[in-house]
Image (tube, helix red, strand yellow):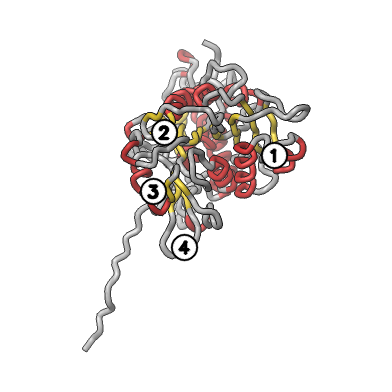
Amino acid sequence: MLPRVKILFAGGALGQVVPSPDGCFGLLTTGAPVEGKLELNKAYAIRKPDDAFITLGITEENNPGLHKAITEFYNEAGEGVKLWIKLFAEAITMTQMVTLATANAAKDLLLEAGGEIRALFIHRTPAESYAPVIAGGLDGDVATARAAAQLLGEWSMDTFKAPIFIVISGLFYSGSPADLTNLTTEENDRVAIFIGDTVSGDGCAIGLIAGRLARIPVQRNIGRVKDSAIITISPAFAGDVSIETADPESIHDKGYITLRSHVGLAGYYFTDDVLAIAQTDDYSHITHRRTIDKAVRIANTIMLQELLEEIPVNGQGQVSVTYAKSLETLIENAIINNMTANAELGNDPSDQNDTGVECYVDITQNIVSTGRLNVKLRVKPYGYARYIDVELGFKKINS
């Protein structure tokens, strides 16, 4: 086995490096090539709408689905945010896009981007003649794509060392939450399904969720009310059903992200940022996924510098205390400088010793005999006010 660094995720509990592009995402979808400008199966990096609409020649006429997604993305994220796009022929399914063995698809896009992509957004604009096979309340392609996307996410973490999460468009929604597969019984902790659009029909406003995630820091929930409504003018739909009558609570309870309205507030908001896994899991929300993945990238960068390093040991072949403490400090400082300082960890501001990160190197491990260096790293997430109960009554009046 080659010398390597391996990050192991812990469950059941919740040095300076180059700042990471947390909002650098990839969009994979179907469409039509533009002669001399836009090719199928080729990766393009854009930073503003003009890069897509002028340089690549994407219009509402030749690529309505892609044009809509890019417009929505930059309306939310703002110009300057890097977005990788890759276009496929109409016949290509979302499952094929994310399957590891598919040539020139998602895996190759991650490699071409050099590991900088933090999330993939998978969409499709099928041909008018396309006849979906509905399974679990959505196009059956969504279910098979979900499983393939989880494998892609695990490969990107375990082999490529560049952790990602994947959001898949919930296309051809039947309109009934009862039809939906219950994602909270699955184990896809790197995959989310989004149901919702600004127009009635079989599509999905994938650009909206990608743009909002690109705009906010890793610890922030996409449904945070203080960040303003995601849709302020257009109506919102889940399939052919308006959000007002779509029962977004039931859709959410099945483990999907969708849209909702709040009484007293204009516009529409995301329900939450759930992933397709039991909600008791440590990594059941995109906020926790993004937070831990950022810590992974920082820790991996630091630990790569230690690969095949000469490590001082004591008479029993154990890691020296001096080296262990030095490494703990190095990793903790990298997390502090790149996350705690940006308010991305849930440290207690009233406790100056709470940095939101703890690193521990076991000094009893015999590295001479095993060649293995075990490091424990813990970061503290934020709490989220998902359920707020207010006790209200009349003030007591003294007679």
Q: Which residue is mark 3?
A: 246
Q: Disc number at residue 265?
A: 4
Q: Disc number at residue 138?
A: 2
Q: Quadrant of residue 59?
A: top right
Q: Could you tell whether 213 is left or right of 365 in the image?
A: right
Towards the viewer: 115 or 130? 130
Q: Residue at x 34, y 43 (%)?
A: 253
State yes or no: discs 2 and 4 in contact (Cβ < 8 Å). Answer: no
Disc 3 or 4, which lies upstream in sequence? Answer: 3
Residue neighbourhood size for the residue with mark 4, other residues' Cα within 10 Å, grouped as few (<14), some (14–19), many (≥20): few
Residue 361: x and y in percent read 46, 30
Q: CA distance from mark 3 to mark 4?
A: 18 Å
Indicate the amino acid at tag 2: Leu
Quarter placement of the C terminus: bottom left
Residue 121: x and y in percent read 55, 34
In the current view of this chain or complex, which residue is farthest to the front?
129
Disc 2 or 3, which lies upstream in sequence? Answer: 2
Q: Which tag is nearer the camera, tag 3 or tag 4?
A: 3
Q: Which residue is mark 1?
A: 59
Residue 157: x and y in percent read 51, 26
State yes or no: discs 3 and 1 in contact (Cβ < 8 Å). Answer: no
- Tag 3's secondary structure? loop
Q: Could you tell whether 71 is left or right of 236 in the image?
A: right
